[in-house]
Image (tube, helix red, strand yellow):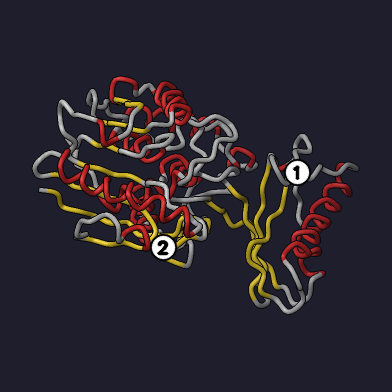
Amino acid sequence: MSFSSSTTVKLFITCSPGVEPLLANEVKQIVNIEPEIAYAGVSLTVPSFEEIMKLNLYLRTASRVLMQLFDAPCRYPQDVYKAFRKRHWTGYFPHLESFMIDAPLVQHRGFTNSLYAAQIAKDGLCDSLKAILDQRPSVDTKNPQIRFVITIIDDLLEVFLDTSLDSLHKRGIRLKGHEAPIRETLAAALLLTVGMKEDDIICDPCCGSGTMLLEAALIQSNTPPGILRNRWGFLKHPKCDYKMWTRVQDEAKKAIRPLKNDSFIAIDNDRDSLDLLKEAVKKLKFEEAFTIKAQNFQEVEFSTPPTLFVTNPPYGVRLQESEDLRPLYRSLGEFMKLKGAHPSRGAIFTTYDMSKEIGLKATKRHVFKNGQLECRLLEYDLY
């Protein structure tokens, strides 16, 4: 596949369900193209590789940027094999890189499960390379060097290169293996929904390892969320322009804004979680902007009161856990009301059941999913 003035490339950018409008707005701001909103993502066409690079680097709410390589009729399962077998894949595998093929959406009478579709596609690709190179690449489903995605709907096969490779919620900031209670992409979506002012002093009284505040700092400083990542799927595309990628990164770094000192206040009584936050803050060079307090939020006194509270407190999945957490939520409501600037704002992300315990009247309510849990983002005006 080549890019020229007469060529456009179809992209599908995935996200969590419910985040689509926020993602569409981000895409338009980054590449000045109005995308079409679909379920769990948006689609658009772009004229060059530069847009693909920028979308991967700058998008805060997206999961993956998928680039369509081709589509083909698919009446029978063997049509998938034939479509992969007849194409030349050597440009993607100059060193027989490891790969995987994911089939997240298969709606076809010939397939009882998506794993079968992925297996047939893998066989076609490997046989194509075997015929030319007399060798096959290895399949790695955990840490591949190249990731392809296929969808089969009715009688149409679509094949995509995952230009992100790793999910975009992996910012390159955290220690390997760390998973926060809320994904970075969802935290960014919540913050973009609430909105932040340039002079806000932002406090998370139940910060844990600080995902919410780290995302807030990235937004406030105009730091691209992917600036510290070094694995990208688009780098494996045969037509990737490495000089262009260097230029895109350099331009992004020049646009980063300095943060004000002590503009993010992180509070938690779990010192291990705060140690993870401190490591991330140091990696981003945000030390002067963060105040980190290892104590219960009810005991904290502020020299300068916060103007915005944002938090994702724990919410118990089991009934007894929920009962134990109800006093925490009542304290949170009192804390925001008494300790914020006048006026100030608050935003709490939690389950529907726990939202009843806060004791404040929400001015806005938004529904998002955190994994399989349906949650509420509740906004408050505090006076």
SS under mark 1: loop
Asked if 70 appears above or below 282 in the picture, the reply is below
Percent coordinates x, y for residue 214 in the rendering: 37, 35
Left or right of 84? Residue 381 is left
Residue at x 41%, y 38% (from the top left corner): 211
Disc 1 residue crowd, few under 14, some 14–19, many 20+, Cα 10 Å: some
Residue at x 31%, y 38% (from the top left corner): 204
Residue type pointed to by label 2 = Gly
Asked if 267 appears above or below 354 in the picture, the reply is above
Disc 2 residue crowd, few under 14, some 14–19, many 20+, Cα 10 Å: some
Q: Which residue is mark 2?
A: 18
Residue type pointed to by label 1 = Asp
Q: Earlier in the sequence, mark 2 or mark 1?
A: 2
Residue 73, image quadrant: bottom right
Q: Which residue is mark 1?
A: 140
Task: Choose between 112 and 246: the one closer to the eye.
Answer: 112
